[in-house]
Amino acid sequence: MKLSELNLRNYGEFLQDPPASFRIKTLNLPAAWDYIYQNKKILLRVDQFGLDYAQAFPPSDVMLFRRDRYERDSTWLTWIDSPQFSEGAFTNFFHPLAGNNRPDRQPDRIEITFAPSHATYLIENQGVRVVTKILIPADEPAIVQMIEVTNLRTTPITLKVLPVLRHAMQWANMDAWDKPEWYLQTAFCNDEAERLGFSTYLTDPKCRAENRRGAVLWSTISGASSAEISYEKFTGQGTWQNPSALFADRLELGLTDGGAWGEYNDKNYIFAYPPVAALQYDFELAPEETRSIQQVLAWTPLSEDYRLPPVAIARQPARFLQAENIAEEIDHLRRAFDVMMNRRRVQSPDAALDQYTNEWLPLQLDWVCSLDRGHPSGMRGGRDSANDFAAMAHLEPAWTRQIILIELSCQRVDGWVPRHYSAKGHAGKERDVRQHVDAGAWVIEMLYEYLAYSKDFALLDERIPWLDQPATQVDSVLQHALKAVEFFIAPENIGEHGLIKLHEGEWLDTVNQAGLEGRGEGVMITNQVIMCLTWMEEILAALVKRGMFAPEDYQQISEKYRHHALCLRDALRQHAYNAEGYFNGFFNDDGHWLFSPQDPDGQRRVYAGANWWSIISGVAVPDLVDSCLKELDFLKTDMGYHLNYPPFDREPVAKVGRMASGDSPVGRSEHANPYNQGSHGFLGRALATAGQGDLLYQTLKYLLPYDQTAHPVAQTLSAPYGVVNVWEDIPRYRNRGKNTFLTGSIAYAIRMVYDWMYGIRPTMDALIIDPCLPTEFTQAEVRFRYLDKNCTLSIDHKSGNQAGMRALTFNGAAIQTTQRDPFNQREVFIIPDTAFTGDDNHIHATL
């Protein structure tokens, strides 16, 4: 079945062309279905109601605008009104509607199309068609909007068209007593009678000149008659949803009241009170006649003295007021996204999975790497960004390299990596220093993936500072990586059972009080550290081969790392593996095992993360795998698998954290839900390690959002194209999908397909091919790039074996070289990097 053939209850449909596109057919969706546009310089979130929010240089800079909490109506919209309307004014997004209208009222025709290049909102209502196109240019911190209004009647019509932006340019985390408008200066500009503009200048509550910002909204002038810059005057005795400006003949400011750029007077200038950027256009349209308004909102650089720039610089984005430039940019964006979606391609018997993997997953990975987890706080998650960029290493290695340098510049000198770090790096002040311990392990995996794909070992010689040291005290990236590993195996960070100490927590954030007193230990993080020790040893061996690391130092470190990995493995099997045949989750400061056959409240609980990572790391391989996987029956739910079960719902349990204190109710977020990355991403990776291709395939369907058997929209309410963070079990909202795009599941989904299902795994000096396929995939093909060469992997899978290669050829020659995988213990074929001499390479695998 193709994605376009899915039954989505007439809410909308996947499109075959353009790629990664979806068409919404009704405004009465069960929830907001959103989509992202971003180019690293600006990020815009939209949904069926219009524009939601925009941020410059995500996730670290100012918000250009955003809706208020729980608000649905766009903060940048265009009112359409006419004395010939019988049902009142409406907007280019239809809602809000003026007057006494039912909230579920539909226009005569509605089509909302989200495509990677641009969003299109088509509304036909009361004999008028309004088409709005919204895009972000490829290389500009700008949002472009074109509104076309067409008369569908057989007689002329008089229209009043009011585009208005309720902007509140601000830093996201203001003090509670501050208001954005206190620091905003807005001026209306008539730029030589060629275009109309609104300048915005943001100052800083803490008097930091470097935190001042500027923006400009340019609009076409043809048909314009008046303007407004005061929100209070625009809404009058009404509201944003029904403003007084709709009922007035004109807005208060005439076009001649607009000053030149940088000119301020009593009419064209406002500060300290909420601003808008509103214009009125008056059109007389003959039948079938179309008029258009183009607008562009752009972040603008300031001058050297932190003031608004000269008009020549401010005007640069105004080229998008020309319709032909917009059309040209859309075409450019389409080509760029085609390149993104053709870097890797899969072809299998499952057409829907192929399309989703080829189109939607790389696009959403691009989004989440800018969104991070959607908190416009100026910080990135230590584990979150490392997780995402481990998958991005193949698609955008330069961006991944940048993130490695930024994150490690925020590492403490003892090797610890913060839970959140400043997106500005060492110079940034935003940071979250809660003592979660796991971020360093995710960073090592990201570093390994980057080096394996890029072979950029020169990165390890780059010199960067430490979080708690002056900027002048720098060490190599290699020293930072070694310190990250050394942090975990330092005696003070290993607990009484020989496992890694928790301190304030690891990946499962709601277990945040199990190790505050210094006794608690974590099972999942211990498994991660075992893998980090193995990866770092491999990195050092590669450096020795290249003459970049002393052999005698490698020998000493290698022996040390192998010793610690073996000790950690033995400790897990001896102490964390319980009598019922699965791994406990945590050991807390009170001396109790949690997620065990008998928790302190008497419940038998299972934590998926501890068990799936015990398989991933090889600790459970081969003899304990089946006993761990039998807990799948215990964790099963109709939306996939619980992350942990049962919930803490009897009484508070001390020294666990939010999950067991009563402060994180049952069914919320990761509390006894199918929490997507942990429930399905970690499980899928474990199943690939275990060679369980059929279960891996089923688990991937649970992770992805489109399958209407696994995730019917009638229950999830969320967009069937958007990967979610969790399927929540909330009263009145059973199985609802939450937090589209704000999840590590996107990176894991990509890696589940390419790394673990198709088994394409680069190492420091070679490419491993180690597929784990479902039985029904008798043939499959993957196109990808490796070492800047084109590669095609064809897999014959008719033996019924779900894993374990029988033969491999490279460009027609049989590959004989194998090695034992350190984690899954399978004998795997390896293709040395030196074999990739031609531009086109063909790999044929037989399972």
Image (cartoon, grey):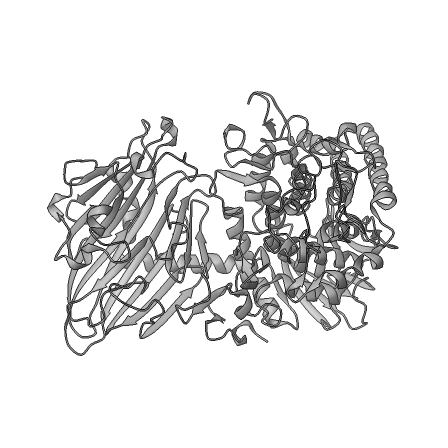
- Residue drawn at x 75%, y 48% is 601
Residue 57 x %, y %: 44, 42
Nearer to me, 436 or 562: 436
Q: Is residue 610 left or right of residue 268?
A: right
Is any part of residue 136 visible from this angle?
no
Residue 774, image quadrant: bottom right
| Residue closer to the observer: 759 or 9 | 9
Q: Image quarter for residue 50? A: bottom left
> If the image is split into quadrants, where does the N terminus sit?
bottom right
Instruction: Tell which of 748 and 664 is nearer to you.
Output: 664
Identified at 44% across, 51% down, the residue is 38
Residue 727 in percent (x, y) is at 59, 60
> In this view, which residue lies farthest toward the bottom?
154
Q: Is residue 802 left or right of residue 704?
A: right
Q: Is residue 726 visible?
A: yes
Name, please, the residue furthest toward the front: 651
Q: Assign the C terminus to one quadrant of the image.
A: bottom right
Where is residue 120 shown, x and y percent of the image?
37, 64
The vertical placement of 143 against 5, above or below, is above
